[in-house]
Image: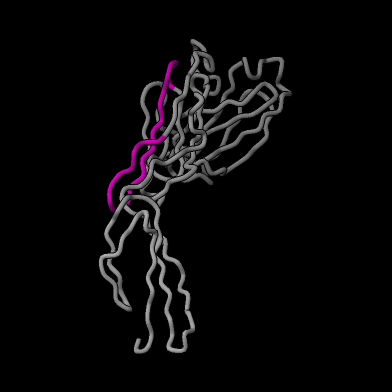
Amino acid sequence: MSGYTVNWTCDNSRLSFVSETDTTADFSIISTGEAYVDARIIAPNDRVLELNKFDVWIGLPAMPTTLPSGYPTVQLNQYQIFNVQIDSMPGCFNVDSVYWSSTGSIVEIASTTGSQCTFEAINSGIGNFYVQTENLCGLSLEGGGTVNVSGGGGGPLGPMLLVYPNPATESFEIQLDESIVSSDQETVESELRIYDQYFSLKEIKKFKGGKYKINTNRLKKGTYIIEVVNKNGKYSTKVIVDK
């Protein structure tokens, strides 16, 4: 680059220069977090060539945030299924480096890596969901939230939405508790939604009455979330398809 000079700039709250040439620059770290490095090339005729600013992340990822965050506490009924998504993950650049876990009254029921995770309220009381992210420097602090599970939902006899057989091979049938569709409500229309473990909608059907059969020919092997919505409310459970 004979006749050309390079002026380097950087985020001086995060980085400081150690050495520089017309083609390279070395920096030392002042603090962790998001930073930038910039270079301007000055030609012999004093024309300035501005290069794209290069954004960098220094150190461990920052604590990720979620939707919902759980603060204030998320209220759930027993046997209810809910989905949590990543809202922000500073310093992490790969959704496969997002890790979920839980304690207390909830349990994860699908994939525990990725940009979202599905949980089921299995007991009454307080439950916590956690998420961490990772980059080449290591793991972030844990983000997440808290849920409060009441004893409602299925009551003493269990969940209001049953699936059998479970695991299923060729087909499975859902059965609604009489509190959802009683014998004198056979004309009540319900909407059935089937989500995969990443909460992506795979099928949607409408039916009347308290039972409905689903063929698995269009479903791959894996865990699915079954959701039924009608005028009485919204109910969910899970089914494992094992072909």
From the viewer's perspective, is residue 87 above or below residue 9?
above
Q: Residue furthest right?
A: 187
Question: Residue 66's spot in the image, x, y percent?
Answer: 47, 38
Rendered residue at 45%/73% (across/down): 51
Rendered residue at 45%/39% (across/down): 65
Q: In the image, 226: left or right of 121?
A: right
Is residue 116 one of those drawn in magenta? no
Rendered residue at 39%/67% (across/down): 9
User: Looking at this view, is 42 or 213 the one in front?
Assistant: 42
Question: Residue 47's spot in the image, x, y percent?
Answer: 49, 84
Question: Residue 229's spot in the image, x, y percent?
Answer: 64, 29
Q: In the image, 125: left or right of 20?
A: right
Q: Which residues are magenta?
A: 122-143
User: Looking at this view, is 181 or 26 the one in front?
Assistant: 26
From the viewer's perspective, is residue 86 above or below residue 232?
below
Is residue 141 one of those drawn in magenta? yes
User: Looking at this view, is 26 or 242 the one in front?
Assistant: 26
Q: Residue furthest front?
A: 46
Q: Quadrant of residue 226?
A: top right
